[in-house]
Amino acid sequence: MDSPPLGSEWGQHGPKLVWRSEKIPCGDGGKHGFSSPVVADGRVYLFLSWTVYEKTGRVLTGPACQQLGLHGDTVTPVLQQKIESARTSPERAAIGEPELGKWINAWLQKNLSASERNAFGEYATDRLKRGDDAAPLHVLAKLRLIADKPFVDERSFESWLTSQGITGEDADWVRAHVPRGKPVCADTVIALDAATGRTLWKKAYPSTIEWWGMSALPASKTVVSTLPVPPALTVSMRLPATRCGGSRAGNTGRTAHRQSRTG
């Protein structure tokens, strides 16, 4: 492959920052997302879902369900208890991010049958990844009932919380995760100046997003840095959770670096 190798030494502060793009509202909450930048002839091309939020009442949209870890899977009580015991175990708490994926895969192989892994492997992976940050199951069960049902104002939302007995830390968690408004998306192609990060042009077409991770989405700001071996670039992005609702979920905002050639 005709491409310069990545540097073996990154230094204490990582690669040198070259530029930042304009804010690109995209992905979960318009905060971050996936992308596959293409660099050619002095330009950086991005294909993304440009996302802004309508100023409406609270509504638990599909993407919001994804961030909550609200799945469509129906898990048996026995299997549910097994997953929850592992999620809250001291062993899980001691696992660091670098080894988490390996630990989860080993746990799935040991504790789930082949048919269970096929049906519920992604759900189990999501719960185990979230660890202590996962929402209580009784709260998720109640939130499932209001999926895509808007509240006209904050008072009606608070009344629903009270009627469901959701109080204290659980109520605070729900308030923080049920968005005020619905995402309005447009499939967008952007061309940036590879030397400065300035937007050269942008074309947008109306679209919808059912789950974050279903298509390529970029970061709120594309961060480009030089690598030790020029003329490569590094694009640093915040990665959202992947799909849920019977699909992938649980990647909660890691930072990734993707290499692209400059010409």
Image (cartoon, rainbow, N blue to C red):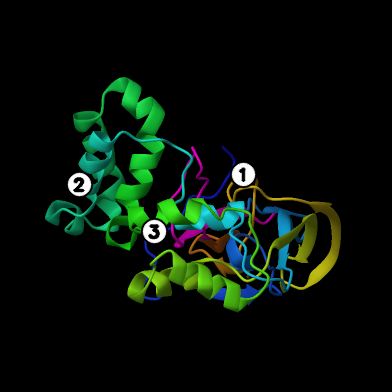
Q: Position of residue 190 (x, y in %)?
A: 78, 60
Q: Work out whether residue 64 can be spotted.
A: yes
Report if residue 210 lies within the magenta region.
Answer: no
Residue positioned most to the front: 163
Q: Amino acid at mark 1?
A: Met
Of labels 2 and 3, earlier in sequence is: 2
> How far separated are the C-alphas under marks 3 and 1?
26 Å
The residue that mark 2 highlights is: 86
The location of residue 234, given as percent across then percent down, is 55, 61
Q: Amino acid at mark 2?
A: Ala
Depth order, front residue of 166/220:
166
Is residue 14 visible in this depiction of the protein? no
Q: Secondary structure at mark 2?
A: helix
- Residue 139 numbered mark, or none: 3
Residue at 63 percent across and 57 percent down: it is: 149
Q: Nearer the viewer, residue 82 or 233?
A: 82
Drawn side of residue 113 relative to residue 74, left or right:
left
Left or right of 158 in this view: 8: left
Apparent side of residue 26 relative to residue 168 in the rendered image (left or right): right
Residue 257 located within the stretch drawn in magenta = yes
Of 208 and 84, which appears nearest the observer? 84
Query: What is the secondary structure assignment of the residue under circle 1?
Result: loop
- Of tags 2 and 3, the one toward the viewer is 3
Please give the range of residues in magenta.
239-263
Q: According to the image, label 1 marks what residue?
A: 214
